[in-house]
Image (tube, helix red, strand yellow):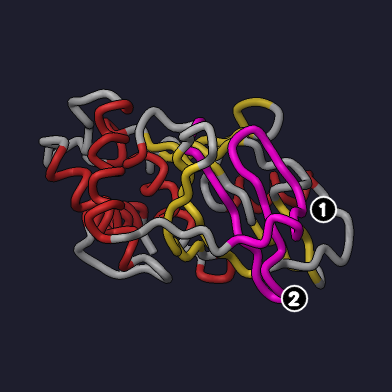
Amino acid sequence: MSIKNIKNELQYILQGKSTVSQGEFIQTITRYLRKSSQTSATTERIESNKAEETTRLVNYINKHNLWNCNINFSSFLSEGAEQRVYIQNNSKVLKLNDAIYYRSWLDYFNNLLLNNYFPDTAYKLVGFYKSDTNIIYALVEQNYVENTQPTNLEQVKLFLEKNGFKNTKNHDYYHPELGIILEDLHDENVLTSNDILYFIDTVFYIKPDILWT
């Protein structure tokens, strides 16, 4: 597939004009945030700050009863700066993410949609959770991937380079034609199961001036 076709496909997914694995609920949220933020149709840039956006998101959650506390906190698996992971059963994990790495919630949800372009590690948005300190988390479900062997990071690099990504530093990559940045692809975020690479915690960022042209 040509770069132009891939770019068009990704644009349609982010705009909610075409489907992606587990994407319907996420696209419903992004449509609401774009509409309420008076987003530019050509650049997807948000004109308001994240605090205001969070207020609108909470209003939407309250209106549609989207709070979800169905989490077994005793099944805690791991934690990073941006999320906490819990084993749900032998085949699924639940992840709480407060979007701290993103300048907006819309950027975070766009990250989920880009991730779900690859269905094996797709996120299902199942609701939202508010902590005792009033931190808002998106609650997502993902297939559990058993790590059967250590991940060869050189193999990750070769795979990404074959698909047009350039290694910018350490475990970060950039696709200059698509305007997509991938960050933090270390061996805890890319697992290897039966010789297949699974990108389970990929952080996507978009350069709007490139992706939306």
Residue 129 visible in the snapshot: yes
Q: Which of 68 and 211 lies nearest the eye of the viewer? A: 68
Q: Quadrant of the N terminus?
A: bottom left
Viewed as shown, does residue 165 lie left or right of 86? left
Q: Quadrant of residue 185?
A: top right
- Residues 187 and 136: in front is 136
Q: Residue furthest front?
A: 132
Secondary structure beneath dot 1 equals loop
Q: Which residues are magenta?
A: 71-100
Q: Which residue is mark 2?
A: 90
- In the image, taking residue 91 as reference, residue 204 lies left or right, namely left
What residue type is disc 1 on? Thr
User: Residue shown at 46%/59% (left/top)?
Assistant: 68
Q: Relative to 107, does residue 1 appear above or below in the rendering?
A: below
179, above or below 76, in the image: above
Dot label at residue 151: 1
Q: Secondary structure at mark 2?
A: loop
Residue at screen point 38% across, 43% down: 178
Q: How many other residues sit within 10 Å of disc 1, few (<14), some (14-19) or many (≥20)?
A: many
Observer-nearest of 114 and 173: 114
Q: Is residue 136 above or below residue 70?
A: above
